[in-house]
Amino acid sequence: MLNYEIQGTGPENLVLLHGFMENLSIWDDMIPFLSDKFRLIKIDLPGFGKSRAIAEIQTSELMAEEVKKVTDVLGLTEFHLLGHSMGGYIALAFAERYPELLRSLTLFFSTYFADDEAKKETRRKGLRIIKENLRAFVNAGVPNLFNPNEHDVLEAKIRLAKEIAYTSSVDGVLASQKGMIERPERKLVLEQFEGKILILSGRHDSTVNSEKTIKNLPDRTNIKSYILDCGHNGHWEKPEICASVINTELLHHLPKNLVL
């Protein structure tokens, strides 16, 4: 089963799924602002952190089933689910199969769109580099995930993101990269899910098309979206603001579609 850790003393369960080449430690900067509001279940996805890769192609559906094994062991039958980037793709797959278990679904710098052909080709080309030199792949890609206007002040966080990515297993990175290429669009999940849906996006995100993601959201009263002044990694770039939105939105109500 996947490695997981539990923190927090709050009354509601929030399951946190990290992104590509990350692990459960990415939430550390946000934990102080969340831990008295939620019981936080942080999971290492297959091939990352202390969890082993489980297949040659780790699809969102396959990884969602592994997450389900953790929530089953913990006896969770009503909880909030949040996923960063690739973790968001997995959260969508989970919500598609088990909507009755979720109080809310949060796409944290993620999208419900499938990769377009150009993005798929970029991922395919990346497979060779990952096999030959994961460290070079990390060094080339990770800095681009942060707000380019703040690389100087974010230098320590960029270095931390690289160090975490270096610990990923090559098998896990390859399998997850292949899985992301195959993932389908899941806008229908947002159209049908009855719980709260929260979207946090970055104005300077070079990985997820935030404008397209927000613009094409279904017009439903249970969906709220926020655009923050950061890149792809709000958990490192704007941890307190991200946590504040999560606390307020999942536990209370705010006006729709705010820009922060």
Image (tube, rainbow, N blue to C red):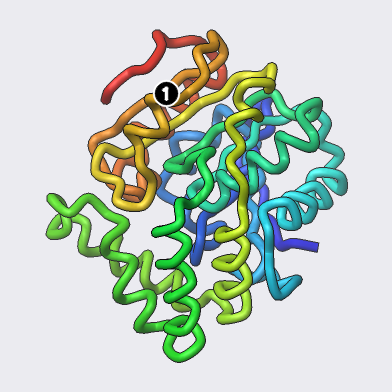
Q: In which quarter of the image is residue 106?
A: top right
Of residues 210 and 245, the one drawn nearer to the viewer in this rendering? 210
Q: In which quarter of the image is residue 174?
A: bottom right
Q: Is mark 1 on a helix, strand or loop?
A: strand
Of residues 35 and 122, the one drawn nearer to the viewer in this rendering? 122
* Figure label count: 1
Residue picked out by circle 1: 225
Query: What's the residue at 68%, 21% (across, down)?
Result: 192
Q: Is residue 8 left or right of residue 111?
A: right
Quadrant of the rendering where the C terminus is positioned: top left
Q: In this view, does 155 lie to the left or right of 236?
A: left
Q: In which quarter of the image is residue 36?
A: top right
Q: Which residue lies furthest to the front in this view?
A: 117
Q: Is residue 23 above or below residue 166?
A: above
Query: What's the residue at 29%, 33% (across, down)?
Result: 228
Q: Position of residue 90 (x, y in %)?
A: 64, 48
Q: Where is residue 54 in the image (x, y as percent from the top left)?
A: 75, 71
Query: What's the residue at 70%, 75% (across, down)?
Result: 56
Query: What's the residue at 26%, 37% (across, down)?
Result: 203
Q: In this view, does 117 lie above or below 128?
A: above
Binning the other alpha carbons within 10 Å of mark 1 as few (below 14), some (14 to 19) or many (20 upward) gives many
Q: Is residue 236 above or below residue 35?
A: below
Q: Where is residue 50 in the image (x, y as percent from the top left)?
A: 65, 70
The three-letter amino acid code for the residue at tag 1 is: Ser
Quadrant of the rendering where the N terminus is positioned: bottom right
Q: Position of residue 206 (x, y in %)?
A: 29, 51
Of residues 154 and 177, the one drawn nearer to the viewer in this rendering? 177
Q: Is residue 122 above or below residue 219?
A: below
Q: Is residue 15 left or right of residue 99?
A: left
